[in-house]
Image (cartoon, rainbow, N blue to C red):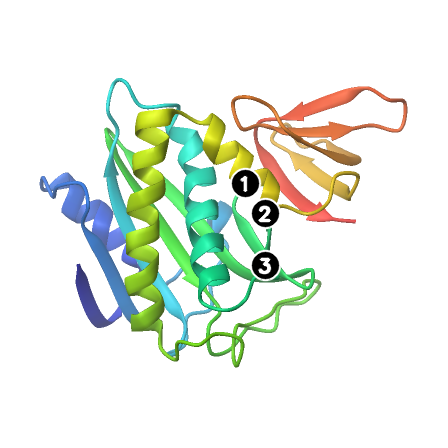
Amino acid sequence: MLTVAETGSTNADLLALAAQGEEEGTWLRAERQTAGRGRQGRPWSSPTGNLYASALVRARPDDPSPASLALVCAVALAETISVLGCPAVTIKWPNDLLLDGAKLAGILLERNGDAIVAGFGVNLASHPSIEGRQTASLAGRLWIHSAAELYDHLTAEFARWLGIWRTQGLAPVIARWEAQAHAPGTLLHANLADGSTIVGAYDGLAPDGALRLRLADGRVHVVHAGDVFLV
Protein backbone atom coordinates (compact mmCIF):
# COMPACT_ATOMS: atom_id res chain seq x y z
CA MET A 1 0.00 0.00 0.00
CA LEU A 2 1.47 3.31 -1.13
CA THR A 3 0.80 6.77 0.31
CA VAL A 4 1.91 10.10 -1.15
CA ALA A 5 1.44 13.63 0.13
CA GLU A 6 0.08 14.96 -3.17
CA THR A 7 -0.62 13.82 -6.70
CA GLY A 8 -2.84 14.73 -9.59
CA SER A 9 -5.07 11.64 -9.44
CA THR A 10 -4.57 8.34 -7.63
CA ASN A 11 -6.54 6.61 -10.38
CA ALA A 12 -4.30 8.00 -13.11
CA ASP A 13 -1.16 7.06 -11.20
CA LEU A 14 -2.33 3.53 -10.53
CA LEU A 15 -3.40 3.01 -14.15
CA ALA A 16 0.12 4.03 -15.16
CA LEU A 17 1.61 1.56 -12.70
CA ALA A 18 -0.72 -1.15 -14.00
CA ALA A 19 0.52 -0.55 -17.54
CA GLN A 20 4.02 -1.23 -16.20
CA GLY A 21 2.93 -4.59 -14.78
CA GLU A 22 1.92 -3.71 -11.23
CA GLU A 23 0.17 -6.63 -9.55
CA GLU A 24 -3.37 -6.84 -8.23
CA GLY A 25 -3.78 -5.73 -4.65
CA THR A 26 -1.77 -2.53 -4.95
CA TRP A 27 -3.38 0.50 -3.32
CA LEU A 28 -2.40 4.16 -3.64
CA ARG A 29 -3.58 6.89 -1.27
CA ALA A 30 -2.91 10.61 -1.53
CA GLU A 31 -3.30 13.18 1.23
CA ARG A 32 -4.38 15.64 -1.46
CA GLN A 33 -5.19 15.53 -5.18
CA THR A 34 -4.76 18.39 -7.62
CA ALA A 35 -6.70 16.81 -10.50
CA GLY A 36 -9.18 14.47 -8.83
CA ARG A 37 -12.13 13.45 -10.96
CA GLY A 38 -15.46 11.72 -10.71
CA ARG A 39 -17.70 10.06 -13.22
CA GLN A 40 -18.01 11.57 -16.72
CA GLY A 41 -14.90 13.67 -16.14
CA ARG A 42 -16.41 15.81 -13.38
CA PRO A 43 -13.82 17.39 -11.07
CA TRP A 44 -13.57 15.95 -7.54
CA SER A 45 -12.64 18.47 -4.88
CA SER A 46 -9.67 17.00 -3.00
CA PRO A 47 -8.52 19.06 0.01
CA THR A 48 -6.39 17.58 2.77
CA GLY A 49 -8.31 15.61 5.39
CA ASN A 50 -10.55 13.50 3.16
CA LEU A 51 -9.84 10.06 1.72
CA TYR A 52 -8.53 9.68 -1.83
CA ALA A 53 -7.42 6.13 -2.59
CA SER A 54 -7.38 3.70 -5.50
CA ALA A 55 -7.10 -0.08 -5.71
CA LEU A 56 -5.87 -2.26 -8.57
CA VAL A 57 -7.78 -5.38 -9.60
CA ARG A 58 -6.74 -7.67 -12.44
CA ALA A 59 -9.77 -9.14 -14.25
CA ARG A 60 -9.76 -12.92 -14.49
CA PRO A 61 -11.59 -15.04 -17.10
CA ASP A 62 -13.86 -16.68 -14.50
CA ASP A 63 -14.73 -13.46 -12.65
CA PRO A 64 -18.28 -12.07 -12.67
CA SER A 65 -18.82 -9.11 -15.00
CA PRO A 66 -16.10 -6.50 -14.36
CA ALA A 67 -18.79 -3.80 -14.34
CA SER A 68 -20.26 -5.38 -11.22
CA LEU A 69 -17.12 -4.41 -9.31
CA ALA A 70 -18.90 -1.08 -8.85
CA LEU A 71 -21.30 -2.84 -6.49
CA VAL A 72 -18.44 -4.57 -4.66
CA CYS A 73 -16.78 -1.20 -4.05
CA ALA A 74 -19.99 0.40 -2.79
CA VAL A 75 -20.73 -2.45 -0.38
CA ALA A 76 -17.17 -2.53 0.95
CA LEU A 77 -17.15 1.22 1.60
CA ALA A 78 -20.63 1.25 3.16
CA GLU A 79 -19.70 -1.67 5.42
CA THR A 80 -16.50 0.09 6.47
CA ILE A 81 -18.27 3.32 7.39
CA SER A 82 -21.03 1.47 9.22
CA VAL A 83 -18.59 -0.56 11.33
CA LEU A 84 -16.69 2.61 12.18
CA GLY A 85 -19.75 4.22 13.71
CA CYS A 86 -22.03 5.66 11.02
CA PRO A 87 -24.67 3.08 10.00
CA ALA A 88 -26.94 5.73 8.46
CA VAL A 89 -25.22 5.75 5.03
CA THR A 90 -27.18 4.54 2.02
CA ILE A 91 -26.05 3.48 -1.45
CA LYS A 92 -27.39 5.09 -4.61
CA TRP A 93 -26.91 3.14 -7.83
CA PRO A 94 -24.41 2.14 -8.77
CA ASN A 95 -21.90 3.21 -6.14
CA ASP A 96 -22.50 6.66 -4.63
CA LEU A 97 -22.83 6.82 -0.86
CA LEU A 98 -25.33 9.23 0.69
CA LEU A 99 -25.78 10.55 4.20
CA ASP A 100 -29.22 12.01 4.93
CA GLY A 101 -29.74 12.21 1.16
CA ALA A 102 -26.53 14.19 0.56
CA LYS A 103 -23.53 12.85 -1.35
CA LEU A 104 -20.88 11.57 1.00
CA ALA A 105 -18.59 9.56 -1.27
CA GLY A 106 -18.04 8.62 -4.88
CA ILE A 107 -16.32 5.70 -6.58
CA LEU A 108 -14.78 5.78 -10.06
CA LEU A 109 -13.83 2.61 -11.93
CA GLU A 110 -11.51 2.82 -14.93
CA ARG A 111 -10.13 -0.02 -17.04
CA ASN A 112 -7.16 -0.61 -19.33
CA GLY A 113 -6.91 -4.19 -20.60
CA ASP A 114 -7.24 -6.55 -17.66
CA ALA A 115 -6.36 -3.78 -15.19
CA ILE A 116 -9.31 -2.24 -13.34
CA VAL A 117 -8.65 0.67 -10.99
CA ALA A 118 -11.26 1.55 -8.40
CA GLY A 119 -10.92 5.04 -6.97
CA PHE A 120 -12.60 6.01 -3.68
CA GLY A 121 -13.28 9.60 -2.67
CA VAL A 122 -14.80 10.04 0.80
CA ASN A 123 -15.71 13.33 2.48
CA LEU A 124 -14.24 12.58 5.88
CA ALA A 125 -13.23 15.94 7.35
CA SER A 126 -15.06 18.34 5.02
CA HIS A 127 -17.38 18.43 2.04
CA PRO A 128 -17.39 20.65 -1.04
CA SER A 129 -20.09 23.08 -2.02
CA ILE A 130 -21.56 21.99 -5.36
CA GLU A 131 -24.29 24.02 -7.04
CA GLY A 132 -27.48 21.99 -7.35
CA ARG A 133 -26.24 19.09 -5.22
CA GLN A 134 -26.28 18.40 -1.51
CA THR A 135 -23.04 17.13 0.00
CA ALA A 136 -22.09 15.80 3.43
CA SER A 137 -19.06 14.69 5.43
CA LEU A 138 -18.34 12.18 8.19
CA ALA A 139 -16.83 14.81 10.48
CA GLY A 140 -17.63 13.88 14.08
CA ARG A 141 -19.52 10.71 13.13
CA LEU A 142 -16.81 8.03 13.31
CA TRP A 143 -14.63 6.68 16.10
CA ILE A 144 -11.56 7.00 13.87
CA HIS A 145 -10.04 10.41 13.25
CA SER A 146 -7.93 10.28 10.09
CA ALA A 147 -8.05 9.30 6.44
CA ALA A 148 -5.18 6.88 7.11
CA GLU A 149 -7.29 4.96 9.64
CA LEU A 150 -10.29 4.88 7.30
CA TYR A 151 -7.99 3.65 4.54
CA ASP A 152 -6.69 0.76 6.65
CA HIS A 153 -10.21 -0.47 7.36
CA LEU A 154 -11.37 -0.01 3.78
CA THR A 155 -8.52 -2.02 2.25
CA ALA A 156 -9.39 -5.00 4.47
CA GLU A 157 -13.13 -4.77 3.78
CA PHE A 158 -12.57 -4.44 0.04
CA ALA A 159 -10.36 -7.55 0.02
CA ARG A 160 -13.10 -9.46 1.86
CA TRP A 161 -15.85 -8.49 -0.56
CA LEU A 162 -13.64 -9.02 -3.59
CA GLY A 163 -13.11 -12.57 -2.35
CA ILE A 164 -16.85 -13.09 -1.90
CA TRP A 165 -17.49 -11.78 -5.42
CA ARG A 166 -14.93 -14.17 -6.87
CA THR A 167 -15.84 -17.29 -4.92
CA GLN A 168 -19.61 -16.92 -4.43
CA GLY A 169 -20.59 -14.79 -7.39
CA LEU A 170 -22.59 -11.59 -7.60
CA ALA A 171 -25.72 -12.70 -5.70
CA PRO A 172 -24.42 -12.10 -2.14
CA VAL A 173 -23.00 -8.73 -3.20
CA ILE A 174 -26.37 -7.69 -4.63
CA ALA A 175 -28.16 -8.87 -1.50
CA ARG A 176 -25.93 -6.74 0.71
CA TRP A 177 -26.11 -3.80 -1.69
CA GLU A 178 -29.91 -3.87 -1.60
CA ALA A 179 -29.89 -4.05 2.20
CA GLN A 180 -27.85 -0.85 2.30
CA ALA A 181 -29.73 1.03 -0.43
CA HIS A 182 -32.58 3.50 -0.09
CA ALA A 183 -36.04 2.05 0.48
CA PRO A 184 -37.96 0.29 -2.32
CA GLY A 185 -40.31 2.75 -3.95
CA THR A 186 -37.92 5.69 -3.62
CA LEU A 187 -38.37 7.90 -6.68
CA LEU A 188 -35.28 8.18 -8.86
CA HIS A 189 -34.46 10.28 -11.91
CA ALA A 190 -32.12 8.65 -14.42
CA ASN A 191 -30.23 10.38 -17.22
CA LEU A 192 -29.62 7.49 -19.62
CA ALA A 193 -26.66 6.85 -21.89
CA ASP A 194 -28.70 7.64 -25.01
CA GLY A 195 -29.50 11.14 -23.76
CA SER A 196 -33.04 10.39 -22.62
CA THR A 197 -34.36 10.71 -19.07
CA ILE A 198 -36.68 8.55 -17.04
CA VAL A 199 -38.33 8.74 -13.62
CA GLY A 200 -39.36 5.64 -11.73
CA ALA A 201 -39.58 3.99 -8.33
CA TYR A 202 -36.57 2.01 -7.14
CA ASP A 203 -37.41 -1.69 -7.48
CA GLY A 204 -34.17 -3.39 -6.51
CA LEU A 205 -31.44 -4.72 -8.77
CA ALA A 206 -31.53 -7.20 -11.64
CA PRO A 207 -29.40 -10.37 -11.27
CA ASP A 208 -26.59 -8.70 -13.25
CA GLY A 209 -26.58 -5.64 -10.98
CA ALA A 210 -28.55 -3.33 -13.29
CA LEU A 211 -31.03 -0.91 -11.71
CA ARG A 212 -34.75 -1.70 -11.86
CA LEU A 213 -37.12 1.28 -12.04
CA ARG A 214 -40.87 0.75 -11.85
CA LEU A 215 -42.64 3.29 -14.05
CA ALA A 216 -45.98 4.96 -13.41
CA ASP A 217 -47.74 2.50 -15.73
CA GLY A 218 -46.36 -0.48 -13.81
CA ARG A 219 -43.71 -1.50 -16.33
CA VAL A 220 -40.16 -2.10 -15.12
CA HIS A 221 -37.33 -0.35 -16.93
CA VAL A 222 -33.86 -1.80 -16.44
CA VAL A 223 -30.99 0.74 -16.39
CA HIS A 224 -27.54 -0.57 -17.29
CA ALA A 225 -25.80 2.80 -17.63
CA GLY A 226 -26.66 6.35 -16.65
CA ASP A 227 -26.62 9.03 -13.97
CA VAL A 228 -29.18 8.51 -11.22
CA PHE A 229 -30.49 11.10 -8.76
CA LEU A 230 -33.05 11.14 -5.96
CA VAL A 231 -36.20 13.00 -6.99
Q: Is residue 33 left or right of residue 14?
A: right
Kindly state the secondary structure of the residue where label 1 is placed: helix
- Cβ atoms at labels 3 and 2 below 8 Å apart: yes
Res 113 quadrant in image: top left
- Cβ atoms at labels 1 and 2 below 8 Å apart: yes
Quote the CA–CA distance across marks 1 and 2: 5 Å
On residue 180, which mark appears? 2
* Image coords of residue 168 (percent x, y): 37, 26
- Residue type at mark 1: give it: Trp
- Residue type at mark 2: give it: Gln
- Residue at the spot 17% in from the left edge and 62% down from the top edge: 2
On residue 177, which mark appears? 1
Q: Earlier in the sequence, mark 1 or mark 3?
A: 3
Kindly state the secondary structure of the residue where label 3 is placed: loop
- Cβ atoms at labels 1 and 3 below 8 Å apart: no
Relative vertical location of residue 17 with respect to residue 61 in this rendering, above or below: below
Res 200 quadrant in image: top right
Relative vertical location of residue 189 with respect to residue 144 in this rendering, above or below: above
Quote the CA–CA distance across marks 3 and 2: 8 Å
1 vs 197, nearest the viewer: 1
Kindly state the secondary structure of the residue where label 2 is placed: helix
